[in-house]
Image (cartoon, rainbow, N blue to C red):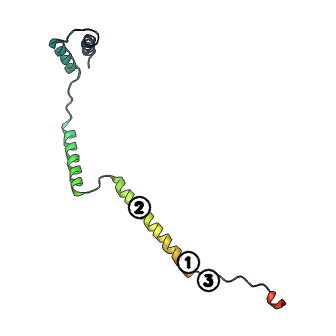
Amino acid sequence: MSRGTAINLRRNWRTLLDKALYGNQDISDDELEALESAIAAALQPVEPQATFREGLRQNLEVARLRKDRGVCIDPVCEARSGVRLGVAFGLLGLLVGTLIYLCLRSPRTKPAESSNKNSV
């Protein structure tokens, strides 16, 4: 935006704002058209490059197909399921190991009796 366009836009905007807020005057169609043309001159439309549009179209098509098939696009989704699976197998292994240890350990011996038998 050139400096002259910015000044023209600001001047038109300030005039209409002053009339609308502080004056009891109606805003004419010519004044609104002047503001509209100043805005149109300041804000030129942007046309994206053809390669960007084509890439965007392809990406959106792939995303739509994956969504239709129920494929998880989010890469975190697979990592979370792997972590959950790892924790589940770890807890299962811990439980099985504890049960095997409890079943196979040798029975504890009774505490040695005192030698009071002989003294009676």
Residue located at (20% from left, 40% from top): 53
Residue underneath mark 1: 102
Residue underneath mark 2: 84
Whole-number angstrom distance, CA of label 2 to CA of label 3: 37 Å
Closest to the observer: 83 or 116? Answer: 116
Q: Say which element carries label 3.
A: loop
**Foreground disc of the pair 1, 2:** 1
Closest to the observer: 55 or 76? Answer: 76
**Foreground disc of the pair 2, 3:** 3
Question: Could you tell which of marks 1 and 3 lies nearer the N-terminus?
Answer: 1
In the image as oriented, which residue stretches furthest toward the right? 119
Q: Say which element carries label 2.
A: helix
In the image as oriented, which residue stretches furthest toward the front? 120
Question: Could you tell which of marks 1 and 2 lies nearer the N-terminus?
Answer: 2
Crowdedness of circle 2 by 10 Å Cα count: few (<14), some, many (20+)? Answer: few
Residue underneath mark 3: 107
State the image coordinates of residue 12 (x, y, percent, origin top left). Answer: 24, 12
